[in-house]
Image (spheres, helix red, strand yellow):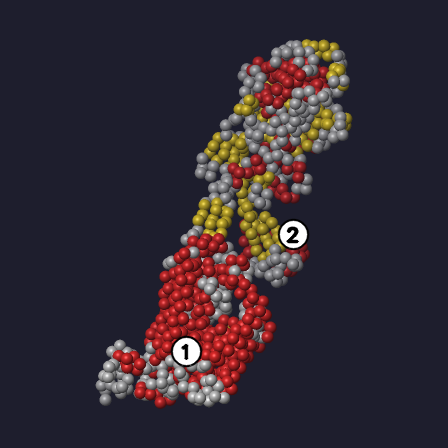
Amino acid sequence: MNQQPDVPAVNPVQRVRIWYALLLLVFGTFAVRVFYLQVIRYDYYKHAALNDQLKQYTVPAERGVITAHLGEGTVPIVLNQKLYTLYADPTIVKHADMDAAKLQPIIGGNVDDITQALQTKQTRYVVLKKRLTPAQSSKVLALQMPGVGTLEQDYRSYPQGSMAAQLLGFVNNDGSGEYGIEQALNGELAGKAGQLKAVTDINGVPLAASSGNLSVAPVAGDNLGLTIDVGMQSALEKIVQSAYNDNKSKDVSAIIMDVHTGAVKAMANYPTFDPANYQDVNDSSVFQNQSVTTPIEPGSITKVFTTATSLQKGVITPQTTFYDPGTWQIDGAKVSDVEEDHSTGQQSILSTLDKSLNTGATWMLMQLGGGQVNTQGRNILYDYFSNHFRLGKATGIEQGYEPDGYVPKPADNGAGINLTYANMSFGQAYTATALQMVSGFSSILNGGTYYQPRLVDTMTHANGVAETVRPKVLETNVISKQVSDNVISLLEQNNTNHIHEGFGYLNFGPNYNVGGKTGTAEIADPNGGYDAHKVNGTYMGFVGGDTPQYAIVVYNLEPSKYAGFAGAGTSQPVFGNIAHMLINDFGVTPKRQ
Amino acid sequence: MNITRLQNRQHSDDAQIRRHRPDYWLVVIAVFLVAIGLTVVYAISPALSAISGGSGVNYVSRQLIAIGLSVAAFLVTARVPLNTWRQWQKPLLVIAAFGTLIALITPVVSQYPHHRWIRLGGFSLQSVEILKFALIIFLAGFLSRQAAAGKLGDAQATFRPLGILLLVMTVVVAGPDALRGQSDLGSFGVILAMAGAMAVMIGMPMRRIMLAAAVLGLLLVFVVTISPYRRERLTTFMHPETDCLNAGYQACQALIAVGSGGISGLGLGSSVQAYGYLPEAQNDSIFAIYAEKFGFIGVMVLLALFVALFARLRLIIERTSDVFSRLVVVGVLAWLSTQMIINVGAMVGLLPLKGITLPLVSYGGTSVLFVGAALGLVFQISHYTSFSSRNVQKSSGQRIYDEDSDDRRRIRRAYHPDSSGRT
């Protein structure tokens, strides 16, 4: 090897200076780079940082509570309460059997079941019990069991139990109202959720010191004051339930409406449900407020509307008599009286109502057409049913799932439209809900003003301002005052006749003015025609003194008893009970002597 | 101090180098850097605790203990004569090798995924830090001896043992987990830089250095190719925006931390990235957190401190005539500067991410401890710097003592503050 002495020919000072210069160059590069990142690209990185760090939370708003009248005052019928869900993380639970033995006295149930739940495999979240009270929750937490905890959750509570359940609806686990008023006015009740924008740590926990926090306070939902009277509602529910039991019906519904404002004072259906335990219901059809959600062919109570229309058009007077041939041939089919007295001879408007003559109603339709069922008569009937009495049209009441119903168009469809309209004149071939019937009827009773039916009297906003809901007029001059008086008189006479025919329970004494009309509606068979063995019994009547005060409609769906005379047999007694209840307990204004 | 032990003085006319006032600036700058690190660790410790569910270790007190140990190590290395260290070069290397071996057989756990740590109870030591310290003394000793013997260009005597040593380092430090290597390319880079800088400064033939560099370059390519996570890191470094959620997460979050700091920073208590977004916030990523807190202005201050530190080291290198001493300082400068560049380069997105601390600033006992020890050596060496070249240039025939120089007492008798005026 070349062993020449390796005297460093290098100058260390020079080399270290070159090295140092290189270091400075690197530092310079860093400085430029950091300037680029922190100054030039600041906005980009600030944005990227906030993208990660700034999280948005919604702060739930307090849902509005619901009150109803009780005599002169109001009482709460829907409130909020905080309950607790008891859960466990089985992977952390140490002594399932011991823990279960300690939990059981607090939460009830069976020790073995709790033990089993605590030992659930392959999950980190088991719900042991829902709806623990705050006291139960704190007792459980005091045990300090590893892996066992409670979660706060908002629930609706119902001081009146299941009262008015279907018109109220319920609030589901997501906090949305379902069915009834909770669904229809969900927006108003729910209020506006607040927003919390906060810079958080990676786990989403807001940083207290963060200056970027921004929050919008939640706005509590409106508190609703209902038109419902709690006492009347409870009484109506009892009547409806006993009618259901007596008649072994599919469903019984009844509505009591203030004829002068459209306010629903009570509205009940049976079967119903317990809104506090809605999750235990198997058949969701009981959630439906049938009075509002189920249009049926209303049957002969429709003759009241046909009569009012004919009186209004001047084609009859209350005293008009006519020859009833027993059957009419229309569109090649026979229209005859399927119920009650079936005979030929002179009949009057009153006897048409009293005996519920389908031929009489058809005759009135023929008078509207100038003597026969024709386009003119159909147009008039359609106009009155649909536009004046608003049958087959959703009313817009504060309820979920309100359908329209169905009134066939009067134009000749080549499929026996005249027969359809003849049927319509006595209550078949079109559908309407109990609410539509009672609202249309109220417009006849109050002299011709159609008020939108409603359940809400007051809305109290989060800022404390209470807004009184004014009756909303949808139609004026539905009929004249004269026709109103005539119809009231006819129905009152009809009631008197019924008393004489043996329905003594319809006797309310001389101080009160009560009238009504029965209906027995055949039920359309899905396969065509009508089912001979199934009918709906209906009733439409009023209670008042000098003027009608309450309009009442009863729908009794498919009662097993009294199939042939469902109206008189099942719904008329319900009406009778309701009228007695109103007169006895709820201060119906008597006649001035 | 025993001046006569110093060998290979370049300036024979300056034979009377005495112990003089050391480079206190070195200490001042280091204290500033350590204080900055401690402040940041203190400021983010609530965040670190919050993220670890409140059960986190007490970072501040642990770091204080580490700093205390570091000061102790500094005092020891500053006082134990350099020659003693020189004599201990082989035992030191053996200790380092032994430590590396223990780290090698210490089982890996999720918190310590590589064979890099020696864990004793609640404390863990990063074995490569011991290795770096030992290597500086060993390489300085070896190279200065070979230079004195005129064998620097000798393949047999110098190049081969050096090559073997570096190969062992390659396998142990840069080697992948599968081979029980430490998989620590960052530290390996520091070691290479140390060895390279010392070789260049001693005047090893550039031809040899280039050859070694070529071989190591090939090895590096090989190591990167066989390690999937390195390939991934390299790919994400090339295109960081493509994979911010997975492999490029830390790199992205580091850039976000730096960039969102802006000109003046969010403020000492206002780092958000430390709340779990940026991994290793107190450790490898402390630069980014610092940049987030103190902004561009703060970063400039920090860079200036490092420049100043390296300037002091450069000055000491220039003024140290003893070859061994000079090489030690060269090694320390290479260590600190390379490690700093690798760390900061990764944080600002100029270099691929490496698991390596920012010297003196990062939380982490071992790093602080051995950097303190290394600075102790430099501090000792700074007692014996020479300013002859400067003085010679200044004077024209007549010798003038630089009023500002640190060593203007050097011709006089030893200055004993305790005894003067009492005898």
Q: Residue B398, position in %: x, y?
A: 23, 83
Q: Residue at x 31, y 81 (%)?
A: B389
Q: Is residue B389 above or below residue A238?
A: below
Q: Residue A497: name its quadrant.
A: top right
Q: Amino acid at mark 2?
A: Gly
Badge 1: few (under 14), some or many (20 or more) residues near its Cα, within 10 Å? many
Q: Residue at x 26, y 87 (%)?
A: B413
Quadrant including the C terminus of chain A: top right
Front residue (pair A376, A18)? A18
Left/right placement of residue A101 relative to residue B331 reads right
Which residue is located at x 40 percent, y 74 percent? A19
- Circle 1 or circle 2, nearest the eye: 1
Could you say where residue A15 lies in the image, as x and y percent from the top left? 39, 77
Question: Based on the displayed image, in which of its 4 quarters is residue A268 positioned?
Answer: top right
Q: Chain of mark 1?
A: B
Q: Looking at the picture, do discs 1 and 2 lie on one chain?
A: no
Can residue A426 be seen here? The reply is no
- Secondary structure beneath dot 2 equals loop
- Determine whether the residue tagged by mark 1 lies in a helix, strand or loop: helix
A44 w.r.t. B191: above or below: above
Residue where numbered disc 2 is placed: A109
Q: From this viewpoint, is residue A473 visible?
A: yes
Quarter of the image where one finds residue A444? top right
- Identified by mark 1, the residue type is Val
Q: Residue at x 75, y 26 (%)?
A: A530
10 Å crowding of disc 2: few (<14), some (14-19), many (20+)? few
Residue B414 horizontal/vertical position (percent): 28, 86
User: In front: B184, or A180?
Assistant: B184
Distance (Cα) linking label 1 and label 2: 78 Å
Above/below status of A408 relative to A144 = above
> What number is the disc on residue B330?
1
Chain on which label 2 sits: A
